[in-house]
Structures are given as structure tokens and as C-alpha cells.
Amino acid sequence: MIDAYEDPGTPDHRGGARYLWWLVTRQPWRCAAGAMFGSVWMVLLAATPYLMSRAIDDGLEPGDMGALTAWSGALFAVGAFNAWLSIMRHRTMTRVRMDANFRTVKVVVGQAVRLGASLPRQMGAGEVVTIGVADVQTISQSLTVVGPGVGAVVAYLAVAVLLVSVSPLIALVVLLGIPVIVLLVGPLLGRLQGSETEYRERQGVLTARIGDLAGGLRVLAGLGGKTLVADAFRRDSQRLREQGYRVGAATSWVQALGIGLPTLFLAVVTWLAARLAAQGDITVGQLVSVYGYVAVLVGPVSFWVECGYQISRGLVCARRVVRFLRLEPMPDTGTRDAPSEPSALYDPESGVRIRPGCLTALVAEHPADAVAVVDRLGRYTPSDATWGGVRLEDIALDQVRDRILVADHESDLFAGTLQDMVRPASRGAGLYRSAAPPRGATSHNAPAAATPHNTALQRALHTAAAEDIVQALPDGLNTPMAAQARNLSGGQRQRIRLARALLADPEILLTVEPTSALDAHTEATVADRLSKARQGRTTVVTTTSPLVLDRTDTVHYLVDGKVAASGSHHELLDTTPGYRALVARDTEEAVR
């Protein structure tokens, strides 16, 4: 089975079927062993009626106790050996399924990390969650076909050969009848695949809505929008339930026919064999063997139908995985080097120019306009933004990520100790919205040694006014934290995110609303410390807080995404009524 640190390989994403075949080829010997165990197991099931018929014809009917004992012993030995084979088959196929499961998980996670910040722009969180939770399990289950599925084919052919020796007529009926059964179930599998595809799509949409609700429930409550969103969620749930009923209806028919049709066929063949026995064309032992052969065939046929059902669902899920694997991150066509010395950032779309070594604020009537500027300056959306007169898109992406950091106020916080949570993945983390967890985790119980890194960590926590958070936790920096730091308040999480960005110590730091969830006193402390800690370094903040704006060197006031005025905070208060009204409103809210 694939090791946790093993390279999963390069998946074949040309189609769902090709992806499933790739999972098989990644473990060929295990799949071959599963096919062998499954085939021998099913063939020996078919040997049981043969041994029983010989015990009747050679021992029981003529009264030969020696022959009866010998054939009975053989029957016991075959049964015991087959029981061992059944155990080995199950163990092997479990390993096949688990390998496919873990390999797909690693491939999906690797793709999510590769896409990084471009992932949310290309696929919703609900879709990714559905792939990682439901689709991966279904895909691994479909690989059962390489074991019992292959065994069912071998057992079918073996029984056909045995039946020829008994009655060519019965053998012909069995050879023709079993494929007819499979063909009858085929159309239902096609219907199931279509229903399953739509069900998975709706499930992804609903999962995304659940994530949105979980993240914005407090905001919805404040706006009075809980009822509206609840009604929409109820409608989506009802549609998903109705689609689930359609999937369940097709599934129930497939499973019912998979059991019912072979059983009905068994009755027909048994009736035919009984008539041949009554006419003296076959012996009583052969009649018993025919019944046994056909009874054994019920298993392979059921396996075929079950495998068809699993493959149909597996193809649906594999196509979703393949669609995810085909996504590409923002192309890196840059070949030029970044400026060798601190240089200005310029966004021609908005007119924002960021002077090197200054603390600059972006104030916008619509916060999304300021965020859009930050995304362009951080090279997270295509634009004509320049750095030192060179288009950002012409500069090698790794150099941009190494020197420009975008710190989102809703960036992910990964589970671990508080120290691990604050420590950046690398100096060139680029954007803390990335799906990649931080590396270099330390022991939860290890004390923090007095190293240069810990000194920098303490400075970052101090600048973000986050020392009280560490002091309040039972084990300080070694306290285990939940994912997204859910055991902290919103303001505490915001300060931890800011401390993480400061610890990365980028040449250019672009922050989005770094103090929006803080009280006035803490916000003033952070603003004062931030301006001192980043003195001489290029820093950009998006905010409308006068407490932060008062510490900045330059403020760009944006109206409809364009720079309407630039200057110091006090200059804009005196000369720009729109800016004054926007900032004064925040001042009144802070007082209240």
C-alpha cells in the first residue's frame, strides 16, 4: 500500500476510465494477486458440486463407503482451502482499495497545493470537499472489479466447461442465458450513471453552501438574513433529496435484478435438468451437480452486476477527479528578474502607485475595490501592474512570491501548536490563502529555545499585540490549536494572522483589513507598532480606520476602483469630502 510520503505518481487525467486504469497499473502485482485469489476461489466454489456428484454416483448410490469417504474428504479439504483463499482474497482487495483511496487523496491534495490561491477562483470549496470525502471512497470501491470481477469471468467459463460434460443443452442455455441477464441490467446502469452525475453536482453545490453558512452565520444574523438563506438551503436540500430518491430507485432495481434474475434463471435450469434426469439422460448425481453449478453461478453473475454498478459510480466520480486535475494554476510566463533594489509598485488600472519604503493605505468606498488592487499588485490576477517599471507578469513568479506577500484577513490557519500556526511555510509564502500547510512542525511539548527565530517570533507577536493571547493559553506557544484557530476569538485570529505575516518579513507586505476585528485600543496599539516595525519597508494596508490611517505615509482614496485623491490622512480629511465622510463614519462607529 502507498506510503504516506511516497510519490503517488503522475495520474492519467485524459478521462474517468483512464484514471481508474491508472490506479490499477500503480499496483499491478497486488491487482494480479487479487484476480488470482478471486478466480481460484470462485472456481473451487464450482468444484464443490462436482465433488458432491462424484460422492453420490461413486459412493452413495453403489454403497461404496471407501469412495464415499474419499470424495467427502476431498470435499472437506477443498472447502477448508477455499476458506483460506477467501481470507486472502478479501485482504488483498482491501489493500487494493485502500491504495487507490490514499493515492487519490494524495493526488487531489497535491493538485490543491499546486493550484494554491487560484483554486477558489476555479472550483468551489464544496466541490473539493465532495471529491475528498465521497468520490475518493467510491473510486476505490470500484476497483473491486479486478478481483472478484475477474474471478467471476473465470468461474463462468469453468462452469460452462463442466456443464458440457454433463449436458451440451444445459451448457448452451447457461452460456446464452447469463449474458442476457447482464444485458437486461445494462440500461439501468446507464440511467444510474446519469442520475449519479447530477446527484454529485448538486451535492457539491449544497456542501459549498454549508461552508458559506458556517463561515458567515454571525454576519447573516447581524444582517437579518438567516431566514432568507435558510429558505434557499431548504430548497437546495429538497432538490438533492429528490435526486437522491432517483439514484436510490435506479440502485434498488439494479440490486434487485442482480439477485432476482440469476435466481429465476437457476429455477429454469434446474427444471430443465430435472426433466433430463427423469428421462434418464443424466444421473441423479449429475442433477445435483447441475443445481450446484447454477447455484454457484448466481454469485459470479451478482458480482458482475455489482461490479457494473460500482464501475458506473466510479466513472462518475473519476470524471470529477479528472476535471479537478485538469485545472491549471495561473501561468508563469515571466522570465525577467525582479528589481535588484526596492522599487515602486504601480497598478495602471486603478492609478495606485506604492512608493518603496513607505506605509501606504488604500481606502475604498467598496472594500472589494481595494482588495482587487492588492490582488493585482500581488500578481494573483492578470493585470498590467508593474514593479520598478517592469510588468509583474514578465517577472519570474518565484521571485515575486519570495519578495511580495499578500496577507488576507481570512487566510487559512492550520491545526497544530500556536508556534507552528504562526511560523510561515517559507520566507516566500506569497499568499496566506494557500492550501499548503506550514512545514517544519516541532514537538508540542518541546520548550521554545532562545534562537534567532524565536526572537523574531516574539517581535512579530509584539507588533501584532498578540502576547496576551500566548500568555492566556495553558501551554503558551506549545498549546495545540484547532484548524482555523476556532478556539480563539475573531480578533485574536486576526492578530495571529498578522503576526504570521510579519514573521515572514517580506520586502513588500500587502495586508487586507489587518485590524477590522479589533477594539479601538488594540487597533491603535497595532497601528503604532506596525508603522515602527515596518519602517523603511514597503507596506500596504486596506482599511478605513482613522486609527490606522493616522500612522500611514500616504493614503490613496478609491472611488469606483480608481484613485480619486492621494495624500496624507489629514490632507484628505481637509480636501476630500467623500473621504472625510467615509472615515468619519468609522470614527463614529468606533465611539459607539
Image (cartoon, rainbow, N blue to C red):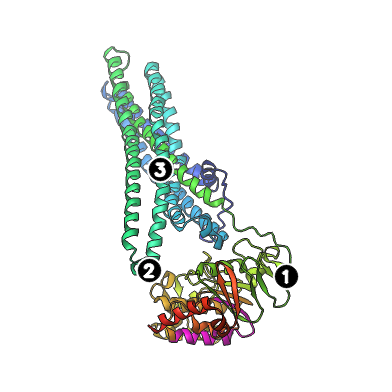
Q: Which of the two discs, 2 and 3, labels the residue nearer the N terminus?
A: 3
User: The disc labelled 3 sits on which kind of residue?
Assistant: Glu
Classify 10 Å Cα crowding around label 1: few (below 14), some (14-19), many (20 and above).
few
Question: What secondary structure is the magenta-colored segment mainly?
Answer: helix
Classify 10 Å Cα crowding around label 2: few (below 14), some (14-19), many (20 and above).
few
Q: Which residue is mark 3?
A: 196
Q: Which residue is mark 1?
A: 389
User: In this orientation, which residue lies closer to the viewer: 563 or 254?
Assistant: 563
Considering the numbered disc 2 on the image, is that residue within a helix, a strand or a loop? helix
User: In this orientation, which residue lies closer to the viewer: 204 or 577?
Assistant: 577
Q: Which of the two discs, 1 and 3, labels the residue nearer the N terminus?
A: 3
Q: CA distance from mark 2 to mark 1?
A: 41 Å
Magenta span covers which residues? 521-541
Query: Which circle, 2 or 3, is nearer the viewer?
Result: 2
User: The disc labelled 1 sits on which kind of residue?
Assistant: Gly
Q: Which of the two discs, 2 and 1, labels the residue nearer the N terminus?
A: 2
| Rendered image: mark on residue 58 | none
Considering the numbered disc 3 on the image, is that residue within a helix, a strand or a loop? helix
The quarter of the picture where the C terminus appears is: bottom left
Question: How far from the left and from the top, in percent, is residue 371?
Answer: 54, 68
Residue at (34%, 39%) from the top-left corner?
Answer: 251
Considering the numbered disc 1 on the image, is that residue within a helix, a strand or a loop? loop
Classify 10 Å Cα crowding around label 3: few (below 14), some (14-19), many (20 and above).
many
User: In this orientation, which residue lies closer to the viewer: 427 or 305?
Assistant: 427
Q: CA distance from mark 1 to mark 3?
A: 53 Å
The answer to if 533 sits in the magenta stretch is yes
Q: CA distance from mark 2 to mark 3?
A: 35 Å
In this picture, residue 350 sits left or right of residue 48: right
Q: Which residue is mark 2?
A: 219
Q: Can you say whether 591 is above or below 152 in the image?
A: below
Residue at (44%, 32%) from the top-left corner?
Answer: 153
Q: Can you say whether 587 is above or below 3 in the image?
A: below
